[in-house]
Amino acid sequence: MPTNPPPVPLTTLGVWGDEDAIRTRVQAHDDAGANDVCVQPLAPDPDDPRRLDWRVLDALVPAQ
């Protein structure tokens, strides 16, 4: 019979700001030993508040 993994604490529910502010918060989670950080940047668009802001995701991708 499979066992359930222990609960994992949610440390931050939301962050807002420009790319630098978000990058700083993501880095802080990484520095604290986070295994995973989920980023879903929503565009400030009143007509479509669920639209992703791909510009932010591009800014957060490490340089190759």
Image (cartoon, rainbow, N blue to C red):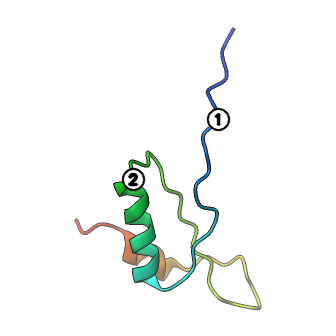
Could you say which disc has been placed on residue 7 in the image? Answer: 1
Quadrant of the rendering where the N terminus is positioned:
top right
Taking the spot 39% from the left edge, 53% from the top edge, the residue there is 32
Taking the spot 77% from the left edge, 90% from the top edge, the residue there is 47
**Mark 1 is on which residue type?**
Pro
- State left or right for residue 60 relative to residue 4: left
The percent coordinates of residue 58 (x first, y second) are 40, 75
**10 or 59, nearer to the observer:** 10
Could you say which disc has been placed on residue 32 in the image? Answer: 2
Q: Secondary structure at mark 1?
A: loop
Q: Secondary structure at mark 2?
A: loop
The percent coordinates of residue 56 (x first, y second) are 47, 79
| N-terminal-most mark, 2 or 1 | 1
**31 or 3, nearer to the observer:** 31
Q: Tell which residue pokes out farthest to the bottom in this image.
A: 46
**26 or 11, nearer to the observer:** 11
